[in-house]
Amino acid sequence: MLFLTSRHLAPQKDSSLLPNRMDILELYTYFKRCSGVTTDSRAPKRDSLFIALKGERFDGNDFALDALAKGCAYAVVDRAELAQKEARCLYVEDSFVALTELARMHRRQLGFPIIGITGTNGKTTTKELISAVLRSTYTIGATVGNLNNQIGVPLTLLSFTPEMQYGVVEMGASHIGDIAELTAIAEPDFGLITNIGRAHLEGFGSFEGVTKAKCELYDWLGQHNGEAWVNADDPLLMQHSAPLVRTTYGTSREAFFRASLLDHPLGYFLAFAFYWQRETYRVHTQLVGKYNLPNALAAVAVGLRLGVAPPDIVMALEHYSPSNSRSQYIANTPHHNNLVVDAYNANPSSMYTAIENFLSTSGAQAKYLILGDMFELGSASREEHLALVQRLARETTDITCYLVGKEFAALESEAKAPHLHYFPSTEILAEQLRLAPIEHAFILVKASRGMHFESLVELC
């Protein structure tokens, strides 16, 4: 156990004397008196513990006294003079380290299993589906939104309470070693990697780097007698999980939990059947696209493995409705369009999957693709965008494609086609849509979140 330093002392009257830094054991006693943990001083929960973190453009220490004035019980700071001025400021060597160690200690006090989830694509959707299935039977805690980094995971763990029966923790990564750090904090008993694709290449350096980083979850499970759920239809995951205790799911006969696709009565949504103890269970989801089958089936596998009754699994999956621009279906907009909005994240793997699924659908409506730049691809960015544009030029001649962003616009002279239209920015396309809106069409909207495609969705 890492200690920040020795015992905390009350602020000294002589300002030349620095208060001693508080150790993690005593800090944890203060945490237990509080209603929760926050790093945002703007609207804190009453009696919560404020932790003053630093960023590139801010220092949470500057807002510690304000957080106390707004109702926080205590503030964890790493600026000594604050503890001298205010007894409710708890002085530590490093607030970020304190957050990490506080979460690690709290996790070890919790008596229930933790499920760790990572992957290139689909991890947030899979986390939400697994949570919905488990929540039908158990009291659980889960990552809110996508708080999946070195700050979000500790905050998630600190939100868990002893009466819970399972915790579901999403883990994100943009560099090798990130997942290793997060597993060392969350200490998962179970783990699941959704898939491994070409994303965050700027941080990982290569696809091999992505693979190494994501498989750090498998490394933890192998070293700590954990269990993995593995997609049997994914050869790469099957290869890297081979040494582990694992439960498989998929459409192949080798999968322990097996499923098959069905036709959905509403066409574009995912429907499937899963098989368990000689019974067949049919599920008609509100998820867009066949590519969501592994995400839904992961939730089935987790539920069955942990004792959720099959009818409850079916009900949980059918009631789940995606939102926040993650494979979200919007029907009959003011311009009489039907939209598939997947504008929270984009990388080559997810982009090709979304486009292929979109192209495979039938219907009388004209089809449009509105695609935005893929971020964080590093030196591979131009190559990946060019490959996508060249494929669109060959394979989507009957579909109008709007390609938005600096990366796409730079390629206009190299991939010209009548159906490809380039826009250097989201704002320029937005202006065109105001003047000449798309009407009576089926539209896929896909981009990295930084492209801010919310404005385009409103105009469709």
Image (spheres, grey):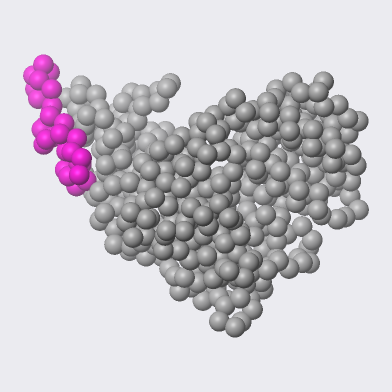
Q: Quadrant of residue 27?
A: top left
Give the left or right position of residue 333, taking residue 159 as reference.
right
Whole-percent x, y for residue 18 in the image:
13, 22
Give the left or right position of residue 53, taking residue 18 as reference.
right
Relative height, residue 30 to residue 20 (above, below): below
**Residue at the spot 56% in from the left edge and 65% down from the top edge:** 249
Q: Quadrant of the C terminus?
A: top right
Instruction: Please name whichever residue, 162 or 308, is drawn nearer the observer in this view of the structure.
Output: 308
**Residue at the spot 73% in from the left edge and 33% down from the top edge:** 387
Whether residue 395 is visible, yes or no, is yes
- Magenta range: 1-29
Whole-percent x, y for residue 452 in the image:
65, 32
Q: Quadrant of the N terminus?
A: top left
Q: Quadrant of residue 72?
A: top left
Whether residue 343 is visible, yes or no, is no
Whole-percent x, y for residue 238 in the image:
53, 57
* Magenta stretch prevailing secondary structure: loop
Relative height, residue 198 to residue 317 (above, below): above
- Can you name the residue that lies furthest to the top here? 16
Relative height, residue 222 to residue 460 (above, below): below
Give the left or right position of residue 183, taking residue 338 as reference.
left
